[in-house]
């Protein structure tokens, strides 16, 4: 399904707007600060039920408003012969998000409200690429775990349930450890019960992560070569906190955990290692290599979704064309075109409309252009 219409009310800069987007490639172009990224983020919110840039929905409300509303109409790309390209008949799926300050968020598909927002995960697979994503390569393991979890949450419902159960158990276990810093040690039998339940969760999570890396790595490697034209081997390795959660393993002492005030073992401490030619990307890769690696990593998400049986996916590229050289830029567009042929809808933002138009013409890629700021944008 493709996003054919987008409506926003009091979302970030927009007081109200409605856009017809019935195209496989859509470009939001305009000067900096005119709302291009906000439009991409609105699409991300409809697909995943959350903003890409903040977990605080209150920060997305237009200044002076009490909430916001998003609506997206998804379906097959409309025929150019139709008088109204936003009309798709029975095949259309309507997704709405309503947030009210002090009340919270409500999400619905075809006017049926989700009892739990997690039920929307994977229904509209989405991948976002933004300038700040270099933190995925350069930051802490928490960034790479978040990347892994958000990807797998869109394809593996059992994985989501294991994560939710693990985090619930960890919260309770950590509360006991924190309380024990200034009081008696936690009950040994109770801690053993927590450890048994947590071990089962960790085992499930680790098995899914290990299996995913095994299949995902070759996808990323192929895309890296397509973008960079480089013979270097791009690899990613799963680094679990423990060698095997299925077998007995050596946990830190309870006293150490009490002193720390939180659990010191488990999949919440796992990591991924990214390498080029057996050298750490974080330590040794050039800026061009890092950018190519990041792009390959994100585009491989789209390919993975399709390989996992998803009929479609949405790719959002925020201001990523400006700092790429001509060769990498051409390789990137060609790689995206191959994904587009398989059912990926592409939204991109750029300050240079003529640059994007020239690139699309060079690659013979039809593209719908939307100029920002939109008429109802707040300056």
Image (cartoon, grey):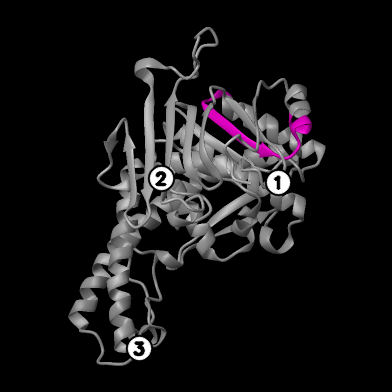
Q: Is residue 133 placed above or below 34 in the rendered structure?
A: below
Q: Secondary structure under badge 2?
A: loop
Instruction: Tell which of 28 and 210 is nearer to you.
Output: 28
* Residue under the image location 34 percent in, 42 percent down: 107
Q: Are discs 1 and 3 less than 8 Å apart at CB?
A: no
Residue 177 sits in which quadrant? bottom left
Give the residue pinned by disc 1.
Answer: 32
Measuring from the top left, give residue 335's x and y in whole percent. 65, 32
The residue segment tinted magenta is 341-356
* Residue under the image location 49 percent in, 56 percent down: 59
* Residue under the image location 80 percent in, 36 percent down: 327
Residue 243 appears in view: no
Numbered marks: total: 3
Magenta includes 352?
Answer: yes
Give the residue pinned by disc 2.
Answer: 49
Q: Is residue 261 placed above or below 19 in the rendered structure?
A: below
Q: Secondary structure under badge 1?
A: loop
Magenta includes 152?
Answer: no
């Amino acid at each position: 399904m493709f996003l054919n219409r987008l409506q926003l009310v009091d979302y970030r800069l927009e007081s109200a707007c409605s856009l017809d987007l019935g195209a496989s490639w859509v470009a939001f172009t305009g000067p900096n600060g005119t709302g291009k990224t906000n439009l991409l983020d609105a699409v991300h919110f409809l697909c995943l039920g959350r903003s890409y840039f903040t977990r605080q929905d209150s920060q997305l409300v237009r200044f002076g408003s009490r909430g916001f509303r998003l609506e997206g109409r998804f379906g097959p790309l409309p025929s150019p012969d139709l008088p109204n390209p936003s009309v798709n008949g029975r095949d259309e799926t309507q997704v709405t998000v309503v947030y009210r300050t002090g009340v919270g968020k409500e999400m619905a598909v075809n006017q049926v409200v989700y009892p739990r927002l997690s039920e929307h995960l994977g229904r509209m697979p989405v991948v976002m690429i933004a300038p700040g994503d270099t933190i995925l390569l350069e930051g802490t393991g928490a960034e790479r775990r978040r990347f892994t979890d958000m990807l797998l949450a869109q394809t593996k419902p059992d994985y989501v349930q294991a994560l939710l159960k693990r985090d619930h158990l960890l919260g309770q276990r950590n509360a006991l450890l924190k309380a024990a810093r200034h009081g008696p040690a936690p009950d040994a039998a109770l801690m053993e019960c927590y450890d048994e339940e947590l071990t089962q969760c960790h085992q499930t999570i680790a098995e899914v992560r290990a299996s995913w890396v095994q299949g995902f790595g070759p996808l990323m490697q192929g895309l890296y070569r397509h973008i960079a034209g480089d013979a270097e081997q791009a690899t990613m390795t799963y680094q679990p906190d423990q060698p095997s959660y299925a077998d007995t393993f050596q946990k830190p002492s309870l006293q150490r955990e009490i002193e720390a005030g939180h659990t010191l073992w488990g999949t919440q401490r796992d990591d991924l290692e990214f390498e080029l030619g057996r050298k750490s990307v974080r330590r040794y890769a050039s800026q061009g290599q890092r950018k190519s690696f990041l792009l390959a990593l994100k585009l491989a998400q789209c390919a993975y979704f399709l390989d996992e049986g998803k009929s479609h996916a949405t790719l959002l590229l925020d201001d990523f064309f400006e700092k790429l050289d001509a060769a990498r830029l051409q390789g990137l567009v060609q790689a995206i075109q191959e994904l587009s042929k398989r059912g990926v809808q592409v939204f991109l933002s750029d300050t240079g409309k003529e640059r994007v138009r020239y690139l699309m013409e060079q690659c013979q890629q039809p593209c719908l252009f939307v100029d920002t700021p939109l008429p109802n944008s707040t300056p």
